[in-house]
Amino acid sequence: MGDGGNEHALRIGFIGLGNIGSGMCANLLSDGHRVTAFDVDPARLSTQEDGGATPARDAEHVAAESDI
């Protein structure tokens, strides 16, 4: 999800989905990047998952699934 069929899309890790981070994450997804995201607030993470992000269980999981 979130890669728009682009096999060359970057796998981006995103930690922190607050007021600024949530918009940045949504923009990355809109641009066709594959985003693995984490936030300590499950509701914020769920919102990004609904938008196409892959939820991570912790920051280490984000790093393992990301190019940058």
Image: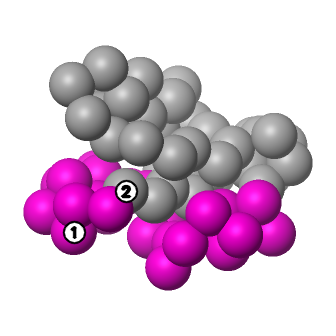
Residue 3: percent from left, percent from top: 59, 49
The residue drawn where x is 41% and y is 42% is: 16
Q: Quadrant of the C terminus?
A: top right
Amino acid of disc 1: Pro
The residue drawn where x is 46% and y is 59% is: 38
In the picture as drawn, the residue positioned furthest to the front comes out as 40
Using a 10 Å C-alpha cutoff, classify the residue at mark 2 as few (fewer than 14 neighbours), some (14 to 19) or many (20 or more).
Answer: many
Q: How is the image coloured?
A: one colour
Q: Nearer the viewer, residue 30 or 59?
A: 59
Q: Secondary structure at mark 2?
A: loop
Picture quadrant where residue 65 is located: bottom right
Amino acid of disc 2: Asp
- Report the disc number at residue 32: none
The residue drawn where x is 51% and y is 30% is: 28
- Where is mark 2, residue-wise? 39
Horizontal side, residue 37 vs residue 39: left or right: right
Picture quadrant where residue 45 is located: bottom left
* CB within 8 Å, label 2 to label 1: yes
Q: Secondary structure at mark 1?
A: helix
Number of dots carrying numbers: 2
- Where is mark 1, residue-wise? 42
Residue 62: percent from left, percent from top: 66, 63
Magenta stretch contains residue 57 = yes
* Whole-number angstrom distance, CA of label 2 to CA of label 1: 7 Å
> On screen, 60 above or below 51?
below
Horizontal side, residue 34 vs residue 26: left or right: right
Q: Is residue 62 visible?
A: yes
Please report the bounds of the magenta region as a residue range: 40-65
Using a 10 Å C-alpha cutoff, classify the residue at mark 1 as few (fewer than 14 neighbours), some (14 to 19) or many (20 or more).
Answer: few
